[in-house]
Image: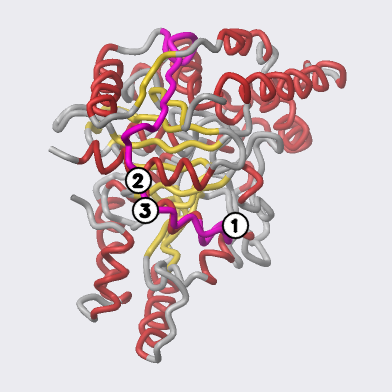
């Protein structure tokens, strides 16, 4: 099993590891990945990372350890300001922008926790796709099958963790951009309640739906990273699964699920039942209204258009044209349509509280399909947009409801990865992380 953040921290505490050695190893893997044509990082900051690692080792020797992240290398999605660097959102349209004069709040919190920041990771341009294709910097490939996507938009971040080029990745999630690549790459991802992590200093996509969180190798890794990012400790122990109440939804998020995903999901439910959990289906028919609610592009297109309209006018030719087309849908929405969207969201959130009230967590396949192949998506716009919509479908429900969710690997050994979504409403982050620990332990039993 891949080493976790807590295991690395224990090695640093015992003197079996140094931050410098660990950082050297991960930078070497990242350089080798780039030399072999990999596209996980858009830039590496090796010299600065090694300076941070040396400082961390010196502080540790003096008895100063800021957090379990002290001396641990992590990667940063190319949306977050890092002082002295350009935040390009993996786009040519921002590539010649002025370097940031300070860190984004999330980056500053990771620095304060003692993390070593290795570099900026590739992504879907402006975070506006669940597939992770990028025509400017190359497309990060799935570490389990290089013919397939890694998932987006935090594609590069997931690949850095999967290939041990970082112990954790800072990503964003507007409609699944943490959970989708986690599911496709066999990792754990946590989308927190949006308000818990500051997005100041981050290139926005949708002010209503954006959130920031971690991709890592375990629920505990995600909890450590989220504690640093949010300032909220979620150290609740894993509960007994016996007697926990899990609901799953055949309608909408349970419809049209690929056979391999359905089999892995059903097997996970069976294991939970065998462990004494109450697992039962429930109806959530109001979710069937979402395609109509978002038919004009939804909150994402409206809010992205607000931010991008001047940049698109000046530099539209430098955009990924598929991204530009999705953003321009927001131009067609007026104030009345935008308010209708906000009202629909508020109404559906009220309904969700009633539907989910009987359950400790809501379970769903994180993504309805396994990672699709890259070539057909690159070749055909129709295939790209149809697949992108299906990939985003399940995860985006949680953003629309302002909830929180984990994605845990639940596939059989040797199979393409599948993610199990463990979901809750706003403010239930501690409970979802705690339940996630218990479910993870069960799924890892062999």
In the image, the segment drawn in magenta is: 227-255
Mark 1, mark 3: which one is toward the viewer? 3
Using the rendered view, name the quadrant where residue 302 is placed: top right
Vertical side of 194 occupied by 244: above or below: above
Vertical side of 267 occupied by 123: above or below: below
Question: Which one is nearer the viewer's eye here, 48 or 349?
Answer: 349
Q: Secondary structure at mark 2?
A: helix
Q: Secondary structure at mark 3?
A: helix
Give the residue at x 71% y 38%.
207
Which numbered marker is on residue 437?
Answer: 2
Give the spatial CA distance, label 1 vs label 3: 31 Å
Using the rendered view, name the quadrant where residue 231 is placed: bottom right
- Which residue has dot 1 on it? 86
Question: Which one is nearer the viewer's eye here, 235 or 77?
Answer: 235
Q: Are marks 1 and 3 in contact (CB under 8 Å)?
A: no
- Around disc 2, counting alpha carbons within 10 Å, would you say few (fewer than 14), some (14 to 19), or many (20 or more)? many
- In primary-sequence order, the first of circles 3 and 2 is 3
Which numbered marker is on residue 220?
Answer: 3
- In primary-sequence order, the first of circles 1 and 3 is 1
Question: Which one is nearer the viewer's eye here, 96 or 266?
Answer: 266
Which numbered marker is on residue 431?
Answer: none
Vertical side of 137 occupied by 368: above or below: above
Mark 1, mark 2: which one is toward the viewer? 2
Give the spatial CA distance, label 1 vs label 2: 37 Å
The answer to whether residue 238 is seen in the rendering is yes
In the picture provided, is 328 more to the left or to the right than 437?
A: right
């Amino acid at each position: 099993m891949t080493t976790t953040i807590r295991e690395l921290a224990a090695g640093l505490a015992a003197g079996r590891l140094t931050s410098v050695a660990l950082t050297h190893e991960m930078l070497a893997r990242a350089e080798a990945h780039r030399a072999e044509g990999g596209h996980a990082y858009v830039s590496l900051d090796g010299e600065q990372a090694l300076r941070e690692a040396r400082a961390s080792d010196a502080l540790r020797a003096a008895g100063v350890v800021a957090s379990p992240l002290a001396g641990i290398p992590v990667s940063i999605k190319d949306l977050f300001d890092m002082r002295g660097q350009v935040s390009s959102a993996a786009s040519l349209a921002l590539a010649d922008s002025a370097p940031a004069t300070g860190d984004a709040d999330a980056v500053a919190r990771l620095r304060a926790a003692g993390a070593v920041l290795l570099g900026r990771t590739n992504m879907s341009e402006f975070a506006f796709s669940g597939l992770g294709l990028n025509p400017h910097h190359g497309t990060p490939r799935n570490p389990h099958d290089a013919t397939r996507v890694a998932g987006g938009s935090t594609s590069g971040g997931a690949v850095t963790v999967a290939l041990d080029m970082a112990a954790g990745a800072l990503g964003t999630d507007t409609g699944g951009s943490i959970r989708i690549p986690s599911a496709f790459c066999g990792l754990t991802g946590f989308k927190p309640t949006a308000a818990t992590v500051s997005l100041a200093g981050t290139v926005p996509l949708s002010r209503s739906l954006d959130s920031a969180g971690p991709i890592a190798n375990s629920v505990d890794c995600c909890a450590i990273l989220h504690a640093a990012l949010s300032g909220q400790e979620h150290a609740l122990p894993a509960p007994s699964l016996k007697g926990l109440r899990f609901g799953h939804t055949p309608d909408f998020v349970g419809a049209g699920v690929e056979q391999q995903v359905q089999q892995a999901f059903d097997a996970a439910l069976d294991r939970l039942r065998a462990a004494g959990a109450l697992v039962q289906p429930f109806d959530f028919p109001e979710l069937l209204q979402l395609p109509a609610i978002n038919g004009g592009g939804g909150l994402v297109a409206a809010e992205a258009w607000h931010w991008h309209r001047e940049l698109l006018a000046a530099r539209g030719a430098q955009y990924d044209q598929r991204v530009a087309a999705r953003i321009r849908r927001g131009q067609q929405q007026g104030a009345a349509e935008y308010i209708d969207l906000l009202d629909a969201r508020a109404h559906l959130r009220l309904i969700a509280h009633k539907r989910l009230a009987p359950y400790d967590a809501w379970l769903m396949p994180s993504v309805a399909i396994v990672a699709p192949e890259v070539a057909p998506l690159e070749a055909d716009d129709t295939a790209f947009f149809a697949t992108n919509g299906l990939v985003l479908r399940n995860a985006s429900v949680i953003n629309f409801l302002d909830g929180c969710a984990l994605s845990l690997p639940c596939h059989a050994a040797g199979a393409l990865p599948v993610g199990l979504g463990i979901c809750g409403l706003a403010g239930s982050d501690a409970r979802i992380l705690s339940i996630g620990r218990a479910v993870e332990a069960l799924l890892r039993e062999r």
